[in-house]
Image: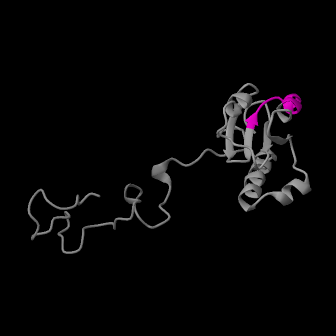
Amino acid sequence: MWGTEPELLVVFDRRWDTGAPGAAVDLAAFGQVTSGLAPRLVLLVAPAGRAGEVAALPGVRGVFVDAVPAGLRAEFDQAENLFVDGWLARRSGKDRGPGDGREWDAPGFAPPDPPSARPAANGLSPGHAHGHRRGPAEGADADGRRPDAEPGLGPDPDC
């Protein structure tokens, strides 16, 4: 949910033309449109108490605060149902664990290791985590120089 106001799900009639003059202006008078699935679904940040006013707009099939009737859901296509599922999932509380919202060094929690102290999971040095091998390239001497390469050309031996 965004901010302190809920996102209302506005469902338009199938025949509703979202490009019709006044369609966006009507919703903008009530709040901010945060998302939509044309031509039928819009999420509108607005006070729940204004849902009835939005529902009275021409072409609006219904406005929902926290659920959609099963009969209406049965009329939605797959994309519309996924959109509604996403809206419902955003409204649900999420358990993020015991440290959620606390400072990283709060009592009872250990701070993260500094980057240089963490071993690389892939066996590479921390500075080479993008996939280059440790040590000199094939055919190079201990300093990473290849005898057949022109000076100043080729890959950086330190990378």
Q: In the rendered structure, which segment of residues is drawn in magenta?
A: 44-53
Quarter of the image where the N terminus is located: top right
Above or below for 74 versus 4: below
Task: Give the total number of marks visible in the rendering.
Answer: 0
Quarter of the image where the C terminus is located: bottom left
Question: Taken as a whole, is the magenta stretch helix, strand or loop?
Answer: helix
Above or below for 16 versus 47: below
Q: Locate residue 36: give its quadrant.
A: top right
Q: Is residue 102 magenta?
A: no
Q: Tell whether 155 sits left or right of 53.
A: left
Residue 102 point in image, percent of width and height: 71, 38
Residue 148 point in image, percent of width and height: 9, 71
In front: 39, or 8? 39
Q: Locate residue 107: give its quadrant.
A: top right
Residue 156 showing in the rendered view: yes
Residue in the image at 61% along x and 44% along y = 111
- In this view, the residue farthest toward the bottom is 139
Which colour assignment does the render follow? one colour
Residue 59 point in image, percent of width and height: 79, 40
